[in-house]
Amino acid sequence: MGEVDKTEKITVNLGLVDLGHIDLLVQEGFYTTRTDFIRTAIRNQLNANGPALDRTVARRTLVLGTQHFSRSDLQALRERGEQIHIRVLGLASLAEDVDPDLAVATIASVEVLGAFRASRAVKAALGSRIV
């Protein structure tokens, strides 16, 4: 399974009546589980708002999907004296061998709508640059 296909766990608080409605639909066989209902509802909302999402992604110049940076990618940036702005809708990741000093020298900002994967030390060093 590719990184973009992995899932993240979220917590959703629902009112008891809403939860009861979901349980009833599950019991009646419309959905296999509560999770199946929630995933379906989310996908339906994302599809219904698809055109607006597409326009927003383009306007905000976000990379859609995954973007991975290796140590050598960032070293090349440092050698050129450049910094990048990471802007991703999906998954942005830094290789495990990227150290905090290299990250700070090459990453001006991080805006990720989804998941940002990097070592704890790198995330801590970039803390003020992560939107």
Image: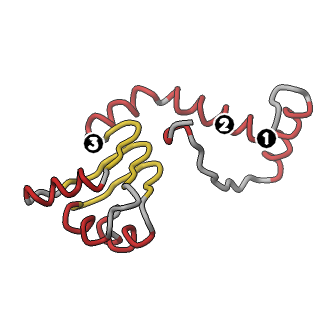
> Which residue in the rendered view is the most extreme toward the right?
27
On screen, residue 93 above or below 105: above
User: Residue 51, located in which quarter of the rendered image?
Assistant: top left
Name the kind of residue labelled 2 in the image: Arg
Residue indicated by mark 1? 34
Circle 3 sits in a helix, a strand or a loop, which is it?
Answer: loop
Kindly indicate whether the residue at mark 2 contacts the one at mark 3 (C-beta within 8 angstroms): no
Residue indicated by mark 2? 39
Please tell me which residue is depicted at 52% across the width and 27% down the height of the picture: 48
Left or right side of 53 for 107 = left
> Which residue in the rendered view is the most extreme toward the left?
80
Name the kind of residue labelled 1 in the image: Arg
Please tell me which residue is depicted at 65% across the width and 34% down the height of the picture: 41
User: Which quadrant of the rendered structure holds the C terminus?
Assistant: bottom left
Q: Going from the N terminus, do you reach mark 3 or mark 2 first?
A: 2
Q: Going from the N terminus, do you reach mark 2 or mark 1 first?
A: 1
Circle 1 sits in a helix, a strand or a loop, which is it?
Answer: helix
Please tell me which residue is depicted at 39% across the width and 68% down the height of the picture: 123
Residue 42, numbered circle: none
Residue indicated by mark 3? 60
